[in-house]
Image (cartoon, rainbow, N blue to C red):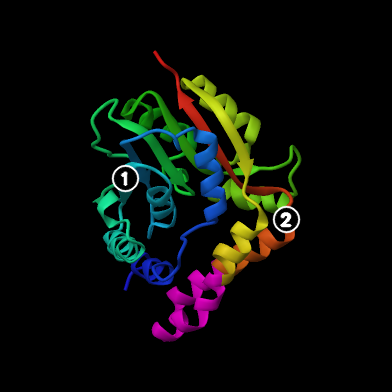
């Protein structure tokens, strides 16, 4: 089993594959202005097993295309959507977020929680813009510095893992430079990291290691996750995901 298969096995049982929460998705929906619109066409990109997809389906009159490059996640999403009674609103699409095949100007909204980092924030907001109708909504969560000064240990870690991490003001400036009007921003609270993501993942470590006979590769994954969790616990005042909601200019 290669590292990708191990990561799938670790994260498939989780409700979330990254920090987030249903109240935070609901807040982003409120900021987006989508609630009173009908027959929306939405793409949820990097959807994982569908926590945000299902919340969107329950909250909006929309057809949602849930995109992820891992078919196993999409199969689990379909199972969960059926259990929640929203399967008819959701179509799954296995594919890469940097090779999307939507028609130009065909989407009312693009949603992406904790996933745009895979292709980089600026690249994502630029390349996805063509799929949005004029006035369409972009809603993404993105790793963000909460302060102008950052502890060295934390800065060095994220500079290695995701060099595009920056302040909210810098991310807002990128949105404006690429033809978006910011509608709202908020940082995810600690509960989105600890209660909704890290603690459930920690609870799976023992079974995960047992399933893989304590292999070196499995141990390496757990150790890396534990180090990231410890770093967040020490420095949660300085970093989070920022949720950015913006509207494509009517032009």
Residue drawn where x is 45% and y is 33% of the image: 138
Return the disc, 1 or 2, that comes first in the chain's sequence. 1
Q: Left of 1 or right of it: where is 191?
A: right
Residue 158 appears in view? yes
Q: Nearer the viewer, residue 46 or 164?
A: 46
Q: How many marks?
A: 2
The residue carrying mark 2 is: 235
Residue drawn where x is 54% and y is 77% of the image: 203
Residue 88 image point, x, y percent: 25, 53
Q: What span is in magenta?
A: 200-224
Residue drawn where x is 55% and y is 27% of the image: 182
The residue carrying mark 1 is: 64
Secondary structure found at label 1: strand
Q: Is residue 7 magenta?
A: no
Q: CA distance from mark 1 to mark 2?
A: 36 Å
Residue 37 image point, x, y percent: 39, 33
Mark 1, other Cα within 10 Å: few <14 / some 14–19 / many ≥20: many
Q: Left of 98 or right of it: where is 197?
A: right
Secondary structure found at label 2: helix
Q: Left of 96 or right of it: where is 173?
A: right
For the N terminus, which image quadrant? bottom left
């Amino acid at each position: 089993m290669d590292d990708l298969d191990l990561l799938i096995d670790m994260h498939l049982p989780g409700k979330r594959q990254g920090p987030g929460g249903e109240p935070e998705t609901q807040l982003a929906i409120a900021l987006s202005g989508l609630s009173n619109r009908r027959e929306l066409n939405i793409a949820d990109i990097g959807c994982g097993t569908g926590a945000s997809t299902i919340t969107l389906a329950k909250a909006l009159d929309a057809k949602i295309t849930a995109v992820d490059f891992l078919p196993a996640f999409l199969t689990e999403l379909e199972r969960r959507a059926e259990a929640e009674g929203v399967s008819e609103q959701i179509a799954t699409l296995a594919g890469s977020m940097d090779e999307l095949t939507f028609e130009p100007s065909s989407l009312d909204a693009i949603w992406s929680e904790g996933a745009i980092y895979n292709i980089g924030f600026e690249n994502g907001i630029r390349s996805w813009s063509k799929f949005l109708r004029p006035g369409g909504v972009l809603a993404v969560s993105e790793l963000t510095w909460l302060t102008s000064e950052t502890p060295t240990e934390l800065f060095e870690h994220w500079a290695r893992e995701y060099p595009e991490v920056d302040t909210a003001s810098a991310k807002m400036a990128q949105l404006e430079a690429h033809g978006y009007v910011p509608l709202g921003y908020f940082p995810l609270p600690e509960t989105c990291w600890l209660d909704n993501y890290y603690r459930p993942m920690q609870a799976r470590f023992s079974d995960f290691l047992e399933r893989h006979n304590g292999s070196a590769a499995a141990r390496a994954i757990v150790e890396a996750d534990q180090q990231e969790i410890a770093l967040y616990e020490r420095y949660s005042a300085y970093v989070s995901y920022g949720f950015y909601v913006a509207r494509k200019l009517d032009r």
